[in-house]
Image: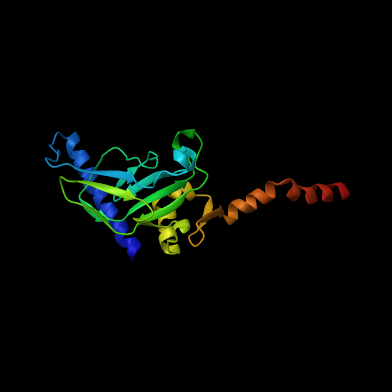
């Protein structure tokens, strides 16, 4: 039921934005005199003497209908993004011990959501603060997600990042999905050896 309500809310918001875009093309004024904005603050503290590779970065953040796609280093904030007035949870991907400037993908992604709904009124700017104090989902902080919430985030919010893995919310670990593991096993030298031996024996 919770997933259905969220889905309906997102679809309604997207429809409203799409209507405005179409109207803009038709030269109808859709400019909001009171634009609304959101900024994501990575409030994880700097550790390890400030070494970027020791920090907890944010891979991506999603709130209502707005994706913040660019990594946000610890102690930094995103650019202000135009949003709609709303109240809902924010979802993020923690990337511990990853330097966003390294040019390599994060070794670990941990899906989290804010403990409380993030709300903003028309014309205001809301700061979406992501830290151990404001989110649940980081097992290292002792606040794991329920499996249902983890499935919602990994399958509906950030499906691309978890398309080939199964995520265990109780341990915050991702393992290759059964299908991918079977394919890898079939392609391994050990899997091919019995076939070759059988062929040679024939």
Observer-nearest residue: 152 or 199?
152
Q: Quick check: 187 left or right of 168?
A: right
Compare residues 41 and 29 and report the one nearer the observer.
Answer: 41
Locate residue 36: give its quadrant.
Answer: top left
Residue ranking furthest to the front: 49
Q: Residue at x 42, y 48 (%)?
A: 93
Q: Is residue 11 left or right of residue 48?
A: left
In this rendering, would 39 be left or right of 23?
Answer: right
Residue 124 can be seen in this image: yes
Question: Percent position (x, y) of residue 54?
Answer: 48, 42
Q: Nearer the viewer, residue 192 or 41?
A: 41
Q: Position of residue 106 (x, y in %)?
A: 49, 42
Residue 149 location, quadrant: bottom left
The residue under the point 17% across, 51% down is: 121
Colour theme: rainbow
Please give left or right for residue 153 compared with residue 84 in the image.
Answer: right
Q: Which percent across, then down, holds residue 102?
A: 49, 34
Q: Quadrant of the N terminus?
A: bottom left
User: Could you say where residue 66 lies in the image, as x and y percent from the top left?
Assistant: 30, 45
| Residue 202 visible in the current orientation | no
Q: Residue furthest bottom?
A: 1
Residue at the (33%, 61%) spot, across then down? 4
């Amino acid at each position: 039921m919770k997933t259905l309500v969220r889905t309906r809310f997102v679809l309604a918001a997207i429809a409203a934005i799409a209507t405005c875009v179409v109207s803009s093309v038709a030269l109808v004024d859709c400019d909001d005199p009171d634009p609304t904005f959101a900024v994501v603050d990575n409030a994880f503290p700097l550790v390890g003497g400030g070494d970027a590779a020791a920090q907890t970065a944010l891979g991506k953040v999603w709130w209502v209908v707005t994706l913040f796609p660019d990594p946000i280093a610890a102690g930094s904030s995103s650019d202000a993004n135009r949003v709609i007035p709303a109240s809902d949870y924010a979802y993020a991907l923690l990337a511990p011990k990853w330097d966003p400037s390294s040019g390599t993908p994060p070794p670990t992604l941990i899906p989290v959501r804010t403990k409380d709904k993030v709300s903003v009124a028309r014309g205001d700017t809301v700061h979406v603060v992501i830290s151990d104090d404001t989110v649940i989902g980081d097992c290292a902080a002792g606040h794991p997600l329920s499996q249902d919430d983890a499935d919602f985030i990994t399958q509906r919010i950030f499906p691309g990042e978890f398309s080939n893995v199964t995520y265990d919310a109780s341990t915050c670990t991702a393992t290759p999905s059964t299908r991918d593991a079977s394919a890898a096993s079939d392609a391994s030298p050990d899997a091919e050896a019995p076939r070759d031996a059988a062929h040679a024996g024939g």
